[in-house]
Image: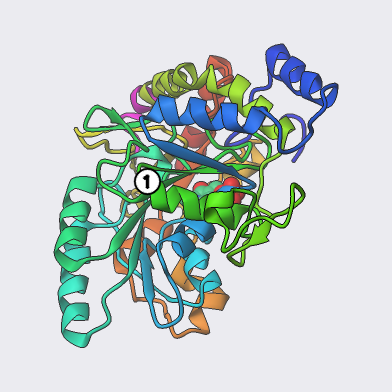
Amino acid sequence: MNKTMIPYGRQEITQADIDAVVAVLESDFLTQGPQVPRFEQAVAAHVGAKHALAVSSATSALHIACLALGLGKGDWLWTSPITFVASANCGLYCGAQVDFVDIDPRTYNLCPEALADKLEKAGKEGRLPKIVVAVHLCGQPCDMQAISALSQHYGFHLIEDASHAIGGKYQDEFIGNGRYSDITVFSFHPVKIITTAEGGMAVTNNDELAHKMALLRSHGVTRDPAQMTHEADGPWYYQQIELGFNYRMTELQAALGLSQLERLNQYVARRHELAARYDQLLAGLPLITPWQHKDSYSGLHLYVIRLQLGKLGVSHREVFELLRKQDIGVNLHYIPVHMQPYYQQMGFAKGDFPEAEGYYAEAISLPMFPNMTLDQQEKVVASIERALQS
Ligand SMILES: *Cc1c(COP(=O)(O)O)cnc(C)c1O
């Protein structure tokens, strides 16, 4: 990407962030020290969850969340086709099969009515999902109350993929408080709302799930005598009681995360200001701006417009290319997962999820990040106006 390109997302790193990371570099612990538990406690307190497990990415958080919930061979995991591939891949990592539920045409999130229909059919065929991953696309929470009611009725577990949504609220409560789900997952990739470079977190109110995820994140190894099968051989002793991974977060990452977390509310508020300004500046153009449900206070990781192609003389691809040519770093979130070659080879085909495919044909993510200037925003809007007129 060239220097003048306005990116679709960008981290903000302050002197306080840098000082926090340097202090860790000069300390005794680069990993497995005091910063990770501090970061975990701070996130848990912020979102209102009992436990938080910091890990190397949201992808690893999704993996250990699925394992902790017992997902394995012969099981099904369902999610939305409009998400990053990681929300589906976590099912495949566990040897389970993956299926999708079409999206709601207004929120672009997994549609509760489509879910209810699919569950009814699956119930009759004896292939109900063990886990549904509800992805809060762009930071806007899914209709968790409806999805949770279905989970009670059909007996599946619920994971919230809140990679876009830390700092957002559902029904006036922070996403991650676990009112409607078993586990919620956050991502701290640099384009997301706060960053640790790479990094993620799984939060839960369930002691047993927290305990399992803690083991799985670090090789399945414990030093806690209470968890061992027999008395310790000596002070050096540890036991491997599960097959786990090295999914740990470093102290450097946790220190950066702690420092960033202090600005979380400010960042989300700033994103709301920028989104409101986009709403205003784009009004009247042949495109659809993001619709927000009344129960939702979105994290607003993304600002996605949909082109009204019937009113335009240019194609979706042409508009996208014209914007990139004007140094507007637009993007597209996401290519429907079922249209990826890896998933097509499992039998998914074009036409399987029409709402998701309709969205893909029209969506464009506009640049939005906390330190975006008003000039940059006006340049984006002027470029869109030019692109739509050509
Ligand atoms: C970014 C993202 C992930 C993966 O996050 P990483 O921290 O990069 O592993 C998963 N799901 C969604 C919806 C994402 O946007």
Farthest residue, direction right:
26
Tell me if residue 358 comes above or below residue 350 in the rendering: above
Quickly name the residue at label 1.
Answer: 136
Q: Can residue 61 be seen in this view?
A: no
Tell me if residue 129 comes above or below residue 151 in the rendering: below
Q: Is residue 282 magenta?
A: yes
Question: Looking at the image, which residue is at 85% across and 21% down?
Answer: 26
Classify residue 118 by image quadrant: bottom left
Foreground residue, 323 or 183?
Answer: 183
Q: Within 8 Å: ligand 1 and the Cβ of disc 1?
A: yes
Amino acid tagged 1: His
Tell me if residue 228 comes above or below residue 236 in the rendering: below
Q: Is mark 1 on a helix, strand or loop?
A: loop
Which color scheme did the rendering employ for the protein? Answer: rainbow
Binning the other alpha carbons within 10 Å of mark 1 as few (below 14), some (14 to 19) or many (20 upward) gives many
Residue 58 horizontal/vertical position (percent):
55, 49
Q: Can residue 291 be seen in this view?
A: yes
Tell me if residue 59 comes above or below residue 43 in the rendering: below
Question: Looking at the image, which residue is at 15% across and 55% down?
Answer: 149
Specify whether 125 is left or right of 379.
left
Classify residue 128 by image quadrant: bottom left
Residue 132 horizontal/vertical position (percent):
33, 62
Q: Does the magenta stretch include residue 49?
A: no
Classify residue 330 by image quadrant: top right
Foreground residue, 17 or 130?
Answer: 130
Residue 276 horizontal/vertical position (percent):
36, 22
In magenta, the rendered stretch is 279-286
Question: Looking at the image, which residue is at 17% across and 59% down?
Answer: 152
